[in-house]
Image (cartoon, coloured by chain):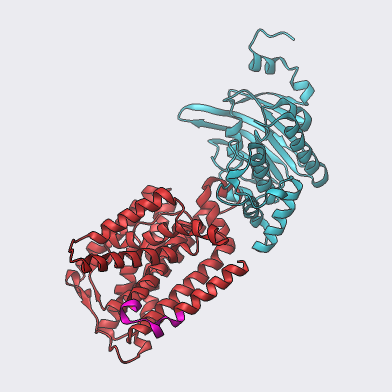
Chain colours: A red, B cyan
Amino acid sequence: MNRRAAALLAILAAALVALPAVAGSYVLSVATLILFFAYTGQAWNVMMGFAGQLSLGHSLYVGVGAYAAAGLFFHYGIGPWAGLWLALAVCVLLGATIGLLAFRFGISGVYFALLTIAFAEFTRIGFDHIDWLGGPGGLFIKVAQREQLDLANLRGPPAMFYYVMLALAASAFALCAWLLRSRAGYYWQAIREDEAAARALGINTFRWKMLAVVISSAMTSVAGVFFAFYYNNLFPEQLFNIGRSIEIILGPVIGGVGTLFGPILGAAALTILADAITEALAALGIEVPGVKQVFYGIVLLGVVMFLPHGIWPALARRLGLDAKR
Amino acid sequence: MLRLEVRNVSKSFRGLRAVAGATFAVDEGAIVGLIGPNGAGKTTIFNMVAGVYAPDEGEIRFGGGRIDGLRPDQICAAGIARTFQIVRPFPGLSVLDNVTIGALARSAGVAEARRYAGEILERLGLAAKRDAPGSALTLPDRKRLEVARALATRPRLLLLDEVMAGLRPTECDQLVAVFDELNRHEGLTILLIEHVMRAVMALARDIVVLHHGEIIARGAPEQVVRDQAVLECYLGEDTEV
């Protein structure tokens, strides 16, 4: 990283840390949402951007992570920091199962993506029938006492959620930056670029693809735990919906697949613009359902047509930075 | 002794017999050329040695142990590296990153691998292009990169699949000089498939000729090019010399 990049990163970090002091609750909720999608986008990017394995079912890990921690809290009063471990374990197991099935039997590309959708879909249907977790009627955990800070149970004011999500997003960024420079990062990129050539260079592609899936699913499950305690209500239909998976993907796709800043930039651009258009339409008195989705579609089309590698690589070149970071 | 032995190896694809009972050996420090007309089974033999396919019959040994049926990454770990007939550099990665990935096979860490990759690029005359993406190289440079990446895995045996095809005579001679030096000074064993006879004659000390999956001749280059069976398979039966 050059000096200019380090300076820009420091300014961004300072601004993000200072934000709750100046921002109102609306801005803070938008910022938290941006960080949430920056984080999940970063996690998805490990699989697709680094290792070239397209997952269209990442809502699976958000949902299962959310239900695991929320279920423990709801029934036994076990806090999210302990529930996190169950979420991690179950999601890693699920990710490893998908990886094992796909990579052992040579399922790749579009067929791999279909497999990830299938897992998310039958999990959704499965959760509709688990009465212990509320079934289709949903699982509700006690809403946070907004004035009282209880970090151990992740109950507290919006600023607490904001800082937790900021810490998660920053950790994910640091982890991905480190991974990309490690042996794993090199091997993943080799697999992404040309798997047969990677094998010929001594890379056990099965093992490294498994590692990508495991890391990605583990990271995403943590976002699920946050989701459960931030929103306090969970419905299978809403959590495991393929639309959720698409939302996770859009950030990194628009920002720049395989880059470190792409997921963050993409999440910010999409969330801010989508909220802005919702607000603008409300101000104009126009109430059209699904306008946000139409907008997403238009932005996606524009990016694919004019910036096929995403916003970040083009922006980075303008700023004189390394487009790959 | 690290000797490659191919013993009575056969391979069929849906009834088509690509290789039929091929037997030959490559001694440590040798340079052996595998030649034959299109469809003779050269690349199939290569792919069996490199672990892409397992032979239907026969066995392949390297350094005394059997390697047939191992995965490509295990073959690489055993000390055999290959190039691809159709070059496949990682297009989105820089030249240095391409070679670093090869070097990681026998390096403790990324820093060491990058250093070694830099040395290999220097040797193959690619140092000036280390930051260019693999996709931006010309064909001769892509061929060199393919060789550099294979060499970075520090092989004892290098398999070259038509690495000279499409090169101009001077470019071909440069690459021949590189292989010759590696062979003389570092004892690198080379098995090459080659159509460019200029390269085969300059490099190989032994030639194995394949036709319809069977070995029809073998020996020193001068001897093989005068062999009646070889001339017939290349030029037709009524050829007189």
Q: Residue at x 31, y 81 (%)?
A: A25
Q: Residue at the front extreme?
A: A284
- A155 relative position to B161: left or right: left
A286, A157: nearer the viewer:
A286
Q: Magenta region: which residues?
A: A17-28
Count the labels in the image: 0
A162, A140: nearer the viewer:
A162
| Picture coordinates of residue B206, whole percent (x, y) | 76, 30
In this view, A299 is above or below A31: above
> Is residue A50 visible to us here?
no
| Picture coordinates of residue B47, whole percent (x, y) | 58, 38
Is A20 a magenta residue? yes
Q: Residue at x 58, y 50 (%)?
A: B73
What is the quadrant of residue A42 in the picture? Answer: bottom left
On-image quarter of the C terminus of chain B: top right
Is A170 a magenta residue? no
What is the quadrant of residue A279 in the picture? Answer: bottom left
A73, B210: nearer the viewer:
A73
Q: Residue at the bottom extreme?
A: A148
Q: Main secondary structure of the magenta part?
A: helix
A107, A216: nearer the viewer:
A216
- B141 relative position to A253: left or right: right
In this view, B103 is above or below B228: below
| Picture coordinates of residue B58, whole percent (x, y) | 59, 36
> Is residue A152 visible to us here?
yes
